[in-house]
Amino acid sequence: MILQCNNLFKAYKKNVFVINNLNLTLPKGRIIGLLGPNGCGKSTLIKMIAGVLQPTKGSILVDGKEVGHQSKAVVSYLPERPYFDPAMKVSELLRYFEEFYEDFDRERANRLLRDLSIDPEAKLKILSKGTKEKVQLILVMSRKAKLYLLDEPIAGVDPAAREYILSTIVSNYDSEATILITTHLITDVEQVLDEFIFFSWGGRVLKSGNADEERTRSGMSLDELFKEVYRCSQSF
Amino acid sequence: MFAKLLKYDLKSVLRYWWVAAVSSVGLTVLACLCGKILAVEYTAMELFQTLAAIAMVFFILGIFLFPVLNTVLVYMRFYKNFFTDEGYLTFTLPVTTAQLLSSKLLCSFIFGAATVFVLIFDCSLAMAIIIPEEFFSLDNWKMLFESFHMLITETFGYGWFTVFSLESLLILIPSTLYASLFFMLCLTLAFMRAKKHRVLAAVAIYYVINMALSFVSSFLMLDGTWLEVLNRFCGDVPDSVSYLNLSMFLLIAIALTVLATAVLYTILHRMLEKKLNLD
């Protein structure tokens, strides 16, 4: 197991729980979609695993370690927003990642930048929003991490870029590593997923399982299945 | 990892700090030149007033705004790096909270010291421009040192002078760190408690806590009153006893400052590690 969440709670206000007693384990070497509507707690969960939010109660173990500097060394996190100093050049960011993350593969990053014709000497502030997001993705995927946390990696980009991002994700990760992707754009990501977790408000897991098996069994796409499962959960 | 963090903190502040430092020196030079022209060559009242106003503005910008700018730069780096979107990078680095905090603390200390050096340089430069004959005269410097020597020997002597100097230096380090930690704590509290105008909230928190602490310290007579009480209690005693009292008072002040700094550090460390939730 790469991730274990035990009796996890998160409340932003007193007694208003975004995550309510979540128990979750993720296996190694899988691409897992954390799928659900906006505001259901997907990002909150990912942020707690990354260490930028503190759980109200419960524990999170990443590769057997509690969230801290040791777990951060094996987790590669892509937030849903631009998070680099805009005054920095792309090449300075590469150096920054190389210095702080032992698992950073500079060659891979350079290759990906070349593929996308991104000038390493360009400052982030002059890049377009889409290019900035690509730079972030390149940096995050150029690490040989054990767990990748990708928070809405395709939400803000055009359909052509979505395809590129997904192919970058799939072709640049170690088979031993796990990728956890959160999104509400299920149709776009379901082609790359090995497993899925349907999330609902309160961080409730509505359904989870193997993506291919579920598609074969139900005869539905994950998107259709999610709508079905979600409708049923609402009627209770 | 600490060295790497410090390197990036120093680089980030230095990017703007050196501009402020060079401007401070430049403005001091300009202010002094205006003053110089004013002293020897003014002919009309209007020119006199204009030059005086320009010299004053340059002087204020050069000498007084530079330390303010240094403070803004250091704490802006702290705030941006921890509490804005950049925090998503800072708090996902494989480093400990202690390393993050210590790096920011040392960075603020280094730039504080550098600012003091620049201001001393500014003042020396101002004297060199305004009174060059006096400033570059070896006899004047000799006289100054002799007066200083006389002052020391006629008052508490070199032994006590060394003790007091060392104690002052010792109290300077923890009190500088305390001041930095205090403002960092206010920024952290403001980030955690306020939804809007967080920097303003931090300033408000700073003044409220400061006022409360001043009240407590004057209530406990930590502002030097104890020393007066002790001296009065000792009555007509030799100077050496008063100096001993002062030295002991300074030692206690050092111990209290170190303790307060350690407490602030622990609180801030705990808040950042256990309570921080980025937006």
Image: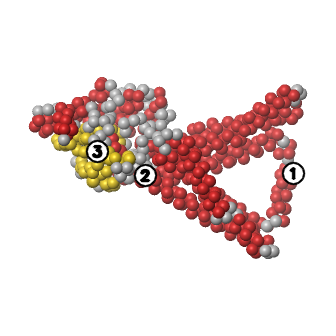
Q: Which residue is mark 2?
A: B275
**Which is nearer the eye, B144 or A185?**
A185
Chain ID at mark 2: B
Mark 1 residue element: helix
Mark 2 residue element: helix
- Residue A93 picture location, percent across and down: 44, 38
Chain ID at mark 1: B
Three-letter amino acid code at disc 3? Answer: Gly
Q: Which residue is mark 3?
A: A202
- The answer to whether residue A49 is left or right of residue B174 is left
Q: Which residue is mark 1?
A: B139
- Residue A40 picture location, percent across and down: 29, 40
Q: Residue at x 77, y 66 (%)?
A: B158
Q: Residue at x 66, y 61 (%)?
A: B218
- Residue B220 picture location, percent across and down: 64, 65
Is residue B177 shown above or below A128?
A: below
- Residue A194 picture location, percent across and down: 20, 39
- Of circles 2 and 1, which is in front? 2
**Which is nearer the eye, B190 or B1?**
B190
Residue positioned most to the front: A236
**Which is nearer the eye, B63 or A113?**
B63
Q: Earlier in the sequence, mark 2 or mark 1?
A: 1
- The answer to whether residue B195 is left or right of residue A68 is right
Q: Residue B217, located in which quarter of the rendered image?
A: bottom right
As measured in the structure, the alpha-carbon distance from the residue carrying label 3 to the one carrying label 1 is 81 Å
Mark 3 residue element: loop
Q: Residue B244, located in which quarter of the rendered image?
A: bottom right
Q: Residues within 10 Å of mark 2 (few under 14, many from 20)?
A: some
